[in-house]
Image (cartoon, helix red, strand yellow):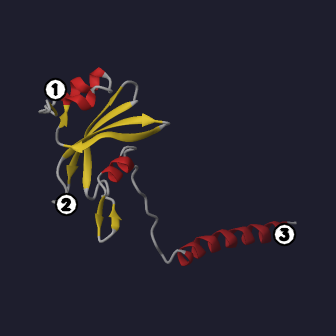
Amino acid sequence: MRKTTIFLLSLALLLVAGLFSVRPIMYGNARPVSISAADPLTGQISQALASSSNGQLVLPVSGQDYTLSGITYFDNHTWAFAAIKPLSNSMNSSNVVLEKQSGVYKVVLGPGSAFPRTTTLTMPADIAQFLNQRGLLYDALD
């Protein structure tokens, strides 16, 4: 009975050691990559900032092309404001207002550096006040 137990333990140990040596071979000695979580607004904002180059859609990448700052949520996270700060000369600083629709944020205003006051008439008053305090609203000339 002892020989059987020793044999099974040796086999199990050999199997575990084999698994640790097979993994690097399978992955070419590559190290695991971890990606930090992106802000939930970055996908929608990248789409709003998209441009076309040679007939190809070019999406800027958060953390590479721009960062978000001053993210402020309103009305129980139904609305959001974000300032977009470029990391290169490929775009200008801008701002966006997003509304959560069917569980997904959609850009409803911007990107832009300032907005006509009339664009906020359908938004909650606290958002219009927030934008006005930041000097992002202007009265459109008729």
Q: Mark 1 or mark 3: name the one nearer the start of the chain.
A: 3
Q: Secondary structure at mark 3?
A: helix
Q: Position of residue 104 (x, y in %)?
A: 45, 40
Q: CA distance from mark 3 to mark 2?
A: 69 Å
Can residue 83 be seen at all in this image of the molecule? no
Q: Mark 1 or mark 2: name the one nearer the start of the chain.
A: 2
Q: Position of residue 120 (x, y in %)?
A: 27, 29
Q: Report the mark closest to the observer, 1 or 3.
A: 1
Q: Position of residue 88 (x, y in %)?
A: 18, 59
**Tag 2: amino acid:** Ser
Residue at (59% x, 70% y) in the render:
20
**Tag 1: amino acid:** Gln
**Circle 1 sits on which residue?**
133
In this rendered view, identify the residue nearer to me: 91 or 114.
Answer: 114
Q: CA distance from mark 1 to mark 2?
A: 28 Å
Indicate left or right for 111 with 76 as reference. left
Q: Quadrant of residue 116?
A: top left
Q: Mark 3 or mark 2: name the one nearer the start of the chain.
A: 3
Q: How many marks?
A: 3
Q: Secondary structure at mark 1?
A: helix
Question: Disc 3 vs disc 2: Cβ atoms closer than 8 Å?
Answer: no
Dot 2: within a 10 Å radius of its alpha carbon, few (fewer than 14), some, or many (20 or more) residues?
few
Dot 1: within a 10 Å radius of its alpha carbon, few (fewer than 14), some, or many (20 or more) residues?
few
| Residue 90 numbered tag | 2
In this rendered view, identify the residue nearer to me: 82 or 139.
Answer: 139
| Residue 92 numbered tag | none
**Circle 3 sits on which residue?**
4
Question: Disc 1 vs disc 2: Cβ atoms closer than 8 Å?
Answer: no
